[in-house]
Amino acid sequence: MSFANHVIIFLVAVPLAVAPVISLLRVRHLPWLMACITSLFVFVLSIQLTQSVLHSGDVTYALGSWPAPYGIELRAGALTAMMTVIVSGVSTMALWFGRYGIYVEVGEQRAHYFYAAWMLVLAGLLGIAVTGDAFNVFVFMEISSLATYVLIAGGPDRRALTAVLKYLIMGTIGATFYLIGVGLVYMMTGTLNFADMEIRLADVENLRPVLVAAGFITVGLALKAAIFPLHVWMPNAYTYAPSAVAVFLSACSTKIALFILLKFDFFVFQKNLAGHDVQFSWFLMPLAAIAIIFGSAVAINENNIKRLLGYSSVAQLGYILMGASFVTYLGLSGGILHIFNHALIKATLFMAVACVFYRVRSAELKDFAGIAQKMPWTMAAFVLAGVALIGVPFTAGFTSKWLLIKAALEAGVVGYLLLAVVLIGSLMALVYVWKVVELAYFKPATADLSRVSEAPLMMRIPLWIMVLMTLYFGIDPSYPVRLANAAAVSLLGHLS
Amino acid sequence: MTEMSEFAELFGLFNYWVFIVLLLIGLYTIIAKSNYIKRLIGLNVFQSAVFLLYISMDKVEGGTAPIILDAGADQIFSNPLPQVLILTAIVVGIATTALGLAIVVRIREQFGSIEEQDILEMETP
């Protein structure tokens, strides 16, 4: 066994092992540096994993050399590979970006614990992505969630504490529902391995417990993924979290829950429950449509920019879910591509807002008046990422929305309705992005901005790398599109 | 006779009824109470209910503890796996409760109250 064979386990093991080491380091910049290097290392590994998945199909790894149905199996397909790239990539950029902000917001004497918790979140999220074992998903989900609560509670505002308690209660209810669902499936099949579950479910005679399990798992993960109307924990948690944490979590944590939802519904249930694809579709499609309209409408009326972006995430998750609820090749690849694009765009937007927050100490909309003259680089980045969020051609947001529109046109009469929803949602995104842009560029400053200057260079560089990637993947989306197409093929392959 | 067997069937599912009742008690406490400590205890009851589900389903009728007794003798064992799984879930439950209580302590320090009504009033100026 060479190193290359072990890539997939190192994705989880390295951050997990580094976390306690970081918590012991008390030297000023060392915890940050170590977290950055670990995150970058994991990112390189996940790129390598993606390459081997694209070239030679699924990668499997038997943990401790125990064969698959008995031991825990790690498995990476195209969708998994994409999730690992998103999680580790955004984590690296957010760590690089967040160095100054975290010293200010969290405090130097607590920074090493903070970075240790960050590594645990990273390990947990990557673990959820790569594991092929349903119970393991629960364990990694709780590792990442518990560490996430710690990260958010580190925020400077005391309202972070109440927001995090709400998140803790909601998140635990979601995870427990998932656990009940897994228990019921285990009761009927006697296995926890996803692939094995699918095969053994075919022999189960009484499917009612499995149907109940599907309900519990869908609702539990919908809570974790902040799918409308189970999103109430999310906007406040992102608003009061330290800025770098908001960058990381907005791009990763809810999408990982969506990913598990897709994995369970498509790999395990679709084939075995009669008409499950229709139920899945009819249950989630209206929720997705309402999420898009409702999330955008609340975002338009919101006066705190971080919360505005949080509600915009509710809407954008609606697009991803809508793509999945078509249960067609185009819809799925559009939805999965939107996971990638939205992670990129929302991370960029939160970074730009964090730059302003670092200088102005406020994310209230009125404090953004006239800020563009003082911080031209930051606001230009905000505008470009905002344009991508709306879905203008030659930005990343366009490609996925284009696929979604094509999928909607395929879907008949309902499709025209959803097409209208996608277009109205995009127009509403234009409104709330413009609200910020208008204030920043065309209104005179209300507060005294004489002491405000451009964000530090080390914050602007990662911000602009993200902006350029948003533009690059809008002009040449072939890499994420290949992954999304492969993922859609493998998800649908289980349906027939 | 049929009534008896129906009753037996229902009573045979006794564990599962207790699971459901505990689950709902926990969920009700989380939703209805405004005191944060009471909510966390409700969350704890809610999680504990699931432990009962897992432990109920591993029981094999007439089965003993999964320990090797006599060499060669046929023996029916209860399934040990759900117990191992739920041990992990119990640890997760403890960690969640501990973290939740720690956050409530911080909330008490910062707001001087653990009643949601008071805190909501403080948060909205």
Image (tube, helix red, strand yellow):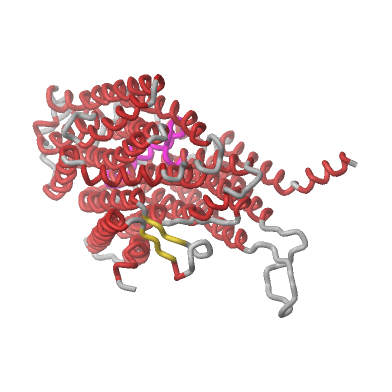
Question: In the image, is residue A235 part of the stretch drawn in magenta?
Answer: yes
In the image, residue A447 sits, relative to residue B114, either above or below, namely above
Give the total number of marks visible in the rendering: 0
Q: Quadrant of the N terminus of chain A?
A: bottom left
Taking depth in this image into account, of A425 and B31 the one nearest to the observer is A425
Please state the horizontal and vertical placement of residue A304, each as a whole percent of the image: 29, 30
Please state the horizontal and vertical placement of residue A272, each as a whole percent of the image: 55, 43
In the image, residue B12 sits, relative to residue A323, either above or below, namely below
Taking depth in this image into account, of A360 and A55 the one nearest to the observer is A55
Q: In the image, what residue occupies the spot 17% across and 23% down?
A: A438
Please state the horizontal and vertical placement of residue B30, each as a whole percent of the image: 57, 39
Question: In the image, is residue A188 part of the stretch drawn in magenta?
Answer: no
In the image, residue A91 sits, relative to residue A234, either above or below, namely below
Q: Which residues are magenta?
A: A223-245
Q: Is residue A364 left or right of residue A16?
A: left
Q: In the image, what residue occupies the spot 43% across and 65% down?
A: A62
Please state the horizontal and vertical placement of residue A119, each as a whole percent of the image: 34, 58
Q: Is residue A262 visible?
A: yes
Q: Is residue A113 left or right of residue A209?
A: left
- Dividing the picture into quadrants, the one containing residue B74 is bottom right
- Dividing the picture into quadrants, the one containing residue A60 is bottom left
- Dividing the picture into quadrants, the one containing residue A335 is top left
Q: Is residue A43 visible?
A: no
Q: In the image, what residue occupies the spot 50% across and 65% down?
A: A71
